[in-house]
């Protein structure tokens, strides 16, 4: 395996993990149930487009 490829994949996984944590934090701290639901819908829509 190419070391540059491996490093890029590792970096991408870290970014994805950081983004997941940020989204989870935003959902947990949402001021209203409607906002929480909206954030969860946006997150779900992005997950399906990323794959």
Image: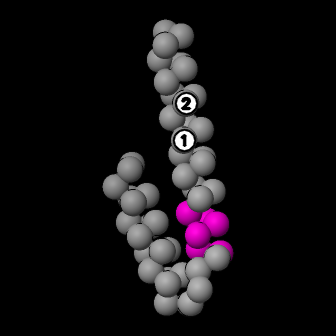
Name the residue at 57% across, 28% down: 10
Q: Is residue 50 above or below residue 12?
A: below
Contact? badges 1 and 2 (CB < 8 Å): yes
Q: Is mark 1 on a helix, strand or loop?
A: helix
Report crowding for label 2: few under 14, some 14 to 19, many 20 or more residues within 10 A (C-alpha): few
The way the protein has been coloured in the rendering is one colour
Q: Where is residue 16 in the image (x, y as percent from the top left)?
A: 53, 45
For residue 47, side relative to residue 18 (left or right): left
Q: Position of residue 45 (x, y in %)?
A: 38, 66
Name the residue at 54% across, 81% down: 36
Q: Is residue 44 above or below residue 22?
A: below
Q: What element carries label 2?
A: helix
Q: Is residue 33 above or below residue 28?
A: below
In space, the residues marked 1 and 2 are separated at their CA atoms by 6 Å
State the mark number for residue 49: none
Numbered range of the magenta stretch = 23-28
Residue ID for mark 2: 11
Report crowding for label 1: few under 14, some 14 to 19, many 20 or more residues within 10 A (C-alpha): few
Q: In this view, does 45 lie above or below 31?
A: above
Residue ID for mark 1: 15
């Amino acid at each position: 395996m190419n070391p540059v490829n491996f490093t890029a994949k590792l970096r991408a996984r870290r970014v994805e993990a950081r983004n997941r944590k940020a989204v989870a934090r935003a959902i947990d701290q949402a001021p209203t149930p409607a906002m929480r639901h909206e954030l969860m819908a946006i997150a779900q829509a992005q997950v399906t487009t990323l794959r």
